[in-house]
Amino acid sequence: MPYAIITRDKPNSLQLRNDTRQPHVEYLTKNKDKLLAAGAQIDDAGQGGYGGIIIVDTEDRAEAEAFIQNDPFTKAGLFAGIEVVRWRKAFFNKERLI
């Protein structure tokens, strides 16, 4: 079962997010073979970014935790919180799996 990583930015950290976005995207691109999905949490108007969701295709919690610890956003101190949880694919790519 994959792991979902849910992050929440520290308050008033949009500038830090924007300043660190490019290295973060490069990190995700370099490791895209490990990802089922990744993206920012944004408001209903499509503005800003206040956290993210990354789904890592691994059976190993330590690997998922290492993945987020090596993310440039984490290294820059962007996050107020990080949650790493198992994720069961019930529906994926428009298909029912269970």
Image (tube, helix red, strand yellow):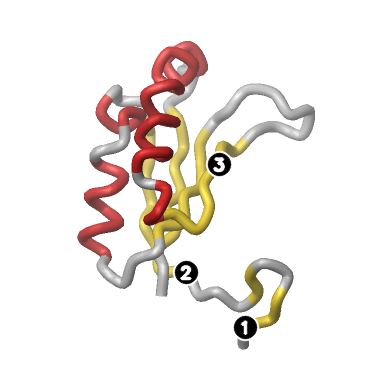
- Identify the mark at residue 45; answer none if there is no mark: none
* Residue identified by numbered label 2: 87
Compared with residue 14, is residue 74 higher up or lower down, i.e. above or below? below
Q: Position of residue 47 (x, y in %)?
A: 69, 23
Residue at mark 3 to residue at mark 1: CA–CA distance: 23 Å
Look at 37% across and 24% down and name the residue there.
23
Q: Amino acid at mark 2?
A: Trp
CB contact under 8 Å: marks 3 and 2: no
Q: Position of residue 57 (x, y in %)?
A: 40, 63
Q: Quadrant of residue 21?
A: top left
* Sequence-first disc among 2 and 1: 2
Residue at mark 2 to residue at mark 1: CA–CA distance: 13 Å
Mark 1 residue element: loop
- Please tell me which residue lies in front, 27 or 43: 27
* Residue identified by numbered label 1: 97
Residue at mark 3 to residue at mark 2: CA–CA distance: 16 Å
Q: Amino acid at mark 1?
A: Leu
Structural crowding at the residue carrying mark 2, measured as other residues with C-alpha within 10 Å and reported as few (<14), some (14–19) or many (≥20): some
* Residue identified by numbered label 3: 39
